[in-house]
Image: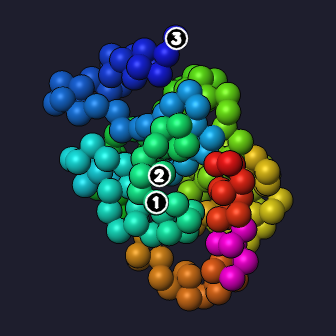
């Protein structure tokens, strides 16, 4: 079984039939030598249209937070990008709709099994944190991110790098002074 085999299975899955009929492939990247996995919510509309994950201002900010170049970020020998759903979920009441339930539970374990060199999983946002940390997550996203050291060395929880989160970042200056330097150090260590 290979990553490409799983990609074909995802496309053949009846739950994804509408996207497959429209020629929309699942949006994730993975390679057998990947060392860092990024788990976010789901591709945005723009990312799905371009076929490139994190192809927006949030992606620019995320790469800055990680301390990596675009070339490093796109290198599947370094990074795998496995959102909680591999398809744009559409619009919700406020922002994009949430990822489909059960999607990550079905596909992530199979893909992760093919990436034995992963030493760090970065959990971006509450959906990823709830899925991977479960009961270990703190009472809310802010407390989980602030307590990042609790989840190391395997997981590193983050807030979403959306430019719309500027108020959250202003209210939580410890994020820039404490979390981001530790994140960059941990990513650099994982990529060595």
Residue 92 percent across, percent down from the top left: 33, 57
Q: CA distance from mark 2 to mark 3?
A: 25 Å
Which class describes the residues within 10 Å of circle 3: few (<14), some (14-19), or many (20+)? few
Asked whether residue 189 is in view, the answer is yes
Q: Is residue 45 magenta?
A: no
Q: Residue drawn 55% across and 81% down?
A: 168
- Residue drawn at x 53%, y 37% is 77
Query: Counting other residues with Cα less than 10 Å from the Cα at mark 1, is it few (<14), some (14-19), or many (20 or more)?
Result: few
Q: Which residue is mark 1?
A: 69
| Residue placed most toward the observer, 31 or 41 | 31
Residue in the picture at 79% in, 51% down: 153
Q: Marks 2 and 1, Cα distance to the nearest angstrom?
A: 6 Å
Q: Are marks 2 and 1 in contact (CB under 8 Å)?
A: yes
Note whether 189 is above or below 23 in the view shown.
below
Q: Nearer the viewer, residue 134 or 115?
A: 115
Residue toward you, 177 or 14: 177
Q: Pointer 2: what residue?
A: 73
Name the chief secondary structure element in magenta: helix
- Magenta range is 177-182
Q: Secondary structure at mark 1?
A: loop
Residue 131 visible, this angle:
no
Mark 2, other Cα within 10 Å: few <14 / some 14–19 / many ≥20? many
Q: In front of the other: label 3 or label 1?
A: 1
């Amino acid at each position: 079984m290979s990553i490409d085999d799983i990609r074909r299975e995802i496309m053949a899955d009846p739950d994804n039939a509408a996207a497959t009929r429209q020629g929309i492939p699942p949006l994730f990247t993975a390679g057998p030598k990947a060392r860092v996995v990024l788990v976010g919510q789901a591709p945005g509309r723009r990312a799905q249209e371009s076929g490139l994950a994190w192809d927006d201002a949030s992606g620019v900010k995320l790469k800055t937070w990680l301390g990596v170049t675009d070339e490093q970020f796109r290198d599947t020998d370094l990074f795998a990008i496995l959102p909680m759903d591999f398809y744009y979920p559409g619009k919700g009441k406020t922002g994009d709709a949430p990822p489909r339930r059960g999607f990550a539970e079905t596909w992530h374990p199979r893909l992760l099994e093919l990436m034995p060199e992963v030493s760090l999983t970065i959990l971006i946002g509450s959906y990823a944190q709830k899925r991977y940390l479960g009961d270990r997550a703190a009472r809310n996203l802010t407390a989980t991110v602030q307590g990042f050291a609790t989840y190391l060395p395997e997981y590193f929880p983050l807030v979403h790098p959306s430019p719309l989160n500027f108020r959250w970042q202003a209210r939580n200056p410890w994020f820039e002074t404490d979390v981001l330097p530790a994140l960059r150090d941990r990513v650099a260590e994982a990529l060595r």
